[in-house]
Image: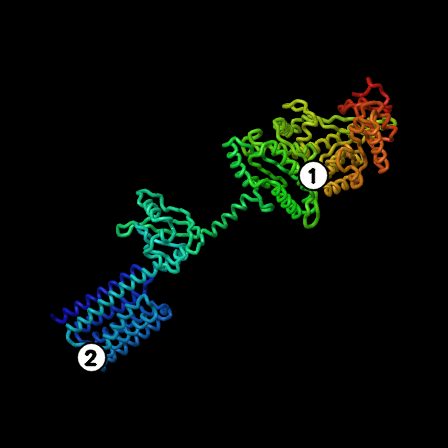
């Protein structure tokens, strides 16, 4: 075979190697070292071909020098780039070195051709040997390619030293063998790099990852998967069955799981949770996300494994935050509704009983305002713990909101509910020892029973809530069971509330005025303004029906403001005709504690040119019970303004004497319940006399309400009472009627006959 034929075969091998390197670079543009090596091999191939096949000339020597320097630069540059040592700043020195090399080699070819030929082979062999050593020593991925380059370098050095047979057959055999080995090493390096990247990718996942075949055996797994399954290394999982790794309870279960992926139209991925038990007994909750994939016609399953221990802990915290009260640790409103619905459903299925207690701490707001919310929370927590200690294990306890608690007793009927209700009242009555002080509280409790009252969770809560408010109206600290009459009352209250909201705008309200006269002479000195309502929808609505409804809402503030302005306007219109009257109006707790109330009083007086001493504000003992500190501030500001303050219905509350000592009041009104007894009951007469004497000793004016007979008036006058008010003097009347009856009259209205009394 001709030498040219051997050379062409060698060049073909070079071309394949160059194409392989260029293909690697094209597919992976980050593989710039492959381009460098391809350029080096291309330079070497062109140089060899032109040297062997071309004619000897000066251009021939120049091309040989350029090819050699290009080959050396390609192999060295590619190796350094691969090792991460070649940067842009190195390109200029490399180009300068190549230029100097070309000049030196070209001069050597002209002066000493034989030495130049030896130098060429030696430089090429040294470059390949150096590149091979660098690859073999620094990177395991291309270790076989490094070995191939070392062999090629040694071959070129041996050729330079004349140790390679000159026969073309031998040279061709060596050349083809080395180049074939180089190509195989490049292919191996690429495959190893792809595999390394794949392994690195799955090992870098924060989740476990495995691939199982149709028989349930694990083919691929990462290190995180091994850790989750309690194994030291991923290699121990390869070839094992998923059931042996406790992912499934049995091989049959694993097979059934895999068959789901054989469905033609499965909704992928499958997401499931499972708890596996490791060999050491540790339980690990896992989330498995699985999808199928096909490789070489075989179906496989890829599974990601996530340790959801922390997620479950966070979910538990979120659930507790969503369904438990942070202050008491018991259920909140949302948690109660869920538990109560289950309880009601169970009771419905067996036609059983279920009792619900709606508990509200009386005047809890005063504790928060006086001692602070921290103390209030401590009280709520102790209160809940005390309730829990009284209840059976199956009871449900929840803080419904604020100072409201709900207890559910499954299986409890009316009789048992009454027993537990009394136990609850007794338990609440005991003082609570808090870190800073000891407090005593009371609670109002409403009870509703399943089937007997509400049949649903919402109905039970509603009915027990209504019963609880009835307990408050009865004087607080009481226990009340729901009945249908309460529902009727609640519905009536809703109807009244709806109609009352538009009463002012529809001009449905008006005032009546009841005279208050002196006890010793019967002269008119005061009038009390009394609110009346004639509704277009409901007709005449008595005050004892609509005033409590208004007090339960913010409507009482608007009504009170309207009464204040109307009373002052009417007093100004009477001026001159009835003397210097004092007008008395009732004030609720909500109205008194309203931040704008003082300004409303001042504005109403200024608008009608009235001095403050002609306005008297009547307060009940219940008003003084609420937020005593704030009430005291408000009363002090009103006194400073010059307005008179009157305590209405004295003696019907709980701490009357304490109020007289604490608050600066100008007038004391004896409740009609005492006045009614003074004629025929010595004890009642003595109580009334004591109140009058006490009021006078404190420098207060005393008014007796509900005076209906002449003997009552005479007795009160003898006791030293200052003023009288009641039907014996006059019924409440319109403003015009009062002006006609009392205008210009200075007589004694106490000695009129019953038939001539003003009514």
Question: Can residue 656 be seen by looking at this rendering?
Answer: yes
Image height check: is 486 above or below 8?
Answer: above
Which quadrant of the structure image shows residue 500? top right
Which quadrant of the structure image shows residue 133? bottom left
Please provide percent x and percent y for residue 328. 60, 45
User: Which residue is farthest top?
Assistant: 755
Please provide percent x and percent y for residue 48. 21, 72
Please provide percent x and percent y for residue 359. 63, 37
Image height check: is 138 above or below 499?
Answer: below
User: Which residue is farthest bottom?
Assistant: 111
Image height check: is 427 above or below 216?
Answer: above
Left or right of 255: which side holds 548? right
Image height check: is 580 above or below 63?
Answer: above
Q: What is the spatial separation of the Cα atoms under label 1 and label 2, in whole angstroms?
A: 114 Å
Could you say which is closer to the camera, residue 429 or residue 203? 429
Determine which residue is flagged by label 1.
Answer: 594
Please provide percent x and percent y for residue 223. 38, 58
Left or right of 288: which side holds 692? right
Disc 2 on helix, strand or loop?
Answer: loop
**Crowd band around label 1 with a 10 angstrom C-alpha radius: few (<14), some (14–19), many (20+):** few
**Crowd band around label 2 with a 10 angstrom C-alpha radius: few (<14), some (14–19), many (20+):** few
Could you say which is closer to the camera, residue 382 or residue 495? 382
Left or right of 291: which side holds 518? right
Which quadrant of the structure image shows residue 659? top right
Determine which residue is flagged by label 2.
Answer: 162
**Disc number at residue 516?**
none
Disc 1 on helix, strand or loop?
Answer: loop
């Amino acid at each position: 075979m001709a030498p040219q034929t051997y050379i062409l075969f060698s060049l073909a091998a070079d071309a394949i190697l160059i194409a392989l390197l260029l293909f690697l670079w094209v597919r992976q543009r980050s593989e710039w070292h492959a381009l460098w090596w391809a350029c080096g091999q291309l330079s070497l191939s062109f140089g060899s071909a032109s040297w062997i096949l071309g004619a000897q000339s000066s251009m021939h020597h120049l091309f040989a020098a350029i090819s050699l320097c290009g080959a050396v630069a390609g192999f060295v540059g590619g190796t350094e780039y691969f090792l991460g040592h070649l940067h842009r700043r190195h390109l200029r020195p490399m180009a300068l070195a190549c230029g100097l090399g070309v000049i030196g080699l070209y001069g050597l070819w002209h002066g000493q051709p034989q030495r130049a030929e030896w130098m060429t082979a030696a430089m090429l062999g040294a470059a390949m040997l150096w590149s091979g050593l660098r690859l073999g020593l620094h990177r395991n991925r291309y270790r076989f390619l490094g070995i191939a380059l070392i062999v090629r370098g040694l071959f070129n050095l041996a050729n330079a030293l004349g140790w390679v047979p000159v026969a073309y057959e031998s040279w061709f055999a060596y050349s083809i063998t080395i180049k074939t080995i180089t190509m195989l090493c490049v292919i191996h390096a690429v495959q190893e790099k792809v595999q390394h990247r794949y392994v690195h990718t799955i090992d870098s996942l924060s989740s476990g990852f495995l691939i199982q075949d149709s028989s349930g055996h694990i083919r691929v797994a990462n290190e995180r998967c091994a850790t989750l399954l309690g194994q030291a290394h991923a290699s121990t999982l390869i070839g094992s069955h998923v059931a042996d790794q406790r992912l499934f309870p049995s091989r049959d279960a694993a097979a059934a799981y895999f068959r789901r992926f054989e469905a033609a139209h499965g909704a992928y991925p499958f997401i499931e949770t499972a708890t596996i038990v490791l060999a050491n007994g540790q339980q690990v909750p896992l989330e498995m996300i699985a999808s199928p994939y096909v490789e070489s016609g075989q179906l496989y399953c890829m599974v990601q494994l996530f340790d959801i221990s922390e997620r479950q802990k966070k979910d538990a915290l979120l659930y507790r935050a969503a369904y438990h009260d942070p202050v008491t640790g018991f259920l909140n409103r949302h948690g109660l509704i869920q538990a109560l619905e289950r309880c009601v459903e169970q009771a419905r299925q067996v036609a059983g009983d279920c009792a619900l207690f709606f508990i509200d701490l009386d005047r809890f707001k005063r504790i928060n305002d006086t001692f602070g919310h921290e103390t209030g929370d401590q009280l709520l927590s102790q209160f809940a713990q005390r309730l829990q200690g009284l209840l059976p294990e199956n009871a449900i306890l929840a803080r419904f909101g604020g100072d409201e608690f709900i207890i559910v007793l499954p299986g409890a009927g009316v009789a048992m509910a009454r027993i537990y209700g009394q136990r609850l009242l007794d338990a609440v009555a005991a003082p609570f020892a808090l870190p800073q002080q000891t407090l005593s509280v009371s609670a109002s409790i409403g009870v509703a029973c399943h089937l007997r009252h509400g049949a649903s969770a919402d109905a039970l809560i509603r009915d027990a809530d209504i019963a609880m408010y009835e307990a408050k109206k009865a004087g607080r600290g009481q226990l009340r069971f729901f009945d249908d009459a309460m529902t009727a009352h609640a519905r009536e209250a809703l109807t009244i509330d709806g109609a009352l909201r538009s009463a002012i705008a529809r001009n449905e309200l008006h005032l009546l005025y009841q005279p208050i006269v002196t006890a010793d002479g019967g002269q008119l000195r005061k009038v009390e303004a009394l609110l009346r309502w004639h509704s277009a929808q409901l007709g005449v609505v008595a005050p004892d029906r609509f005033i409590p409804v208004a007090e339960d809402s913010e409507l009482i503030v608007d009504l009170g403001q309207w009464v204040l302005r109307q009373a002052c306007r009417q007093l100004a219109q009477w001026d001159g005709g009835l003397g210097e009257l004092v007008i008395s109006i009732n004030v609720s707790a909500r109205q008194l504690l309203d931040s704008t109330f003082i300004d409303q009083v001042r504005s109403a007086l200024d608008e009608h040119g009235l001095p403050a001493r002609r306005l008297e504000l009547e307060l009940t003992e219940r008003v003084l019970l609420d937020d005593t500190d704030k009430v005291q501030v408000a009363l002090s500001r009103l006194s400073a303004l010059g307005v008179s303050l009157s305590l209405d219905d004295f003696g019907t509350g709980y701490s009357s004497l304490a109020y007289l000592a604490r608050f600066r009041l100008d007038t004391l009104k004896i409740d009609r319940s005492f006045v009614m007894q003074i004629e025929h009951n010595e004890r009642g007469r003595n109580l009334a006399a004591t109140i009058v004497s006490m009021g006078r000793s404190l420098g207060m004016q005393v008014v007796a309400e509900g005076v209906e007979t002449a003997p009552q008036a005479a007795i009160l006058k003898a006791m030293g009472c200052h003023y009288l008010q009641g039907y014996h003097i006059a019924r409440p009347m319109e403003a015009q009627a009062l002006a006609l009856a009392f205008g210009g009259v200075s007589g004694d209205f106490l000695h009129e006959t019953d038939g001539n009394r003003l009514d």
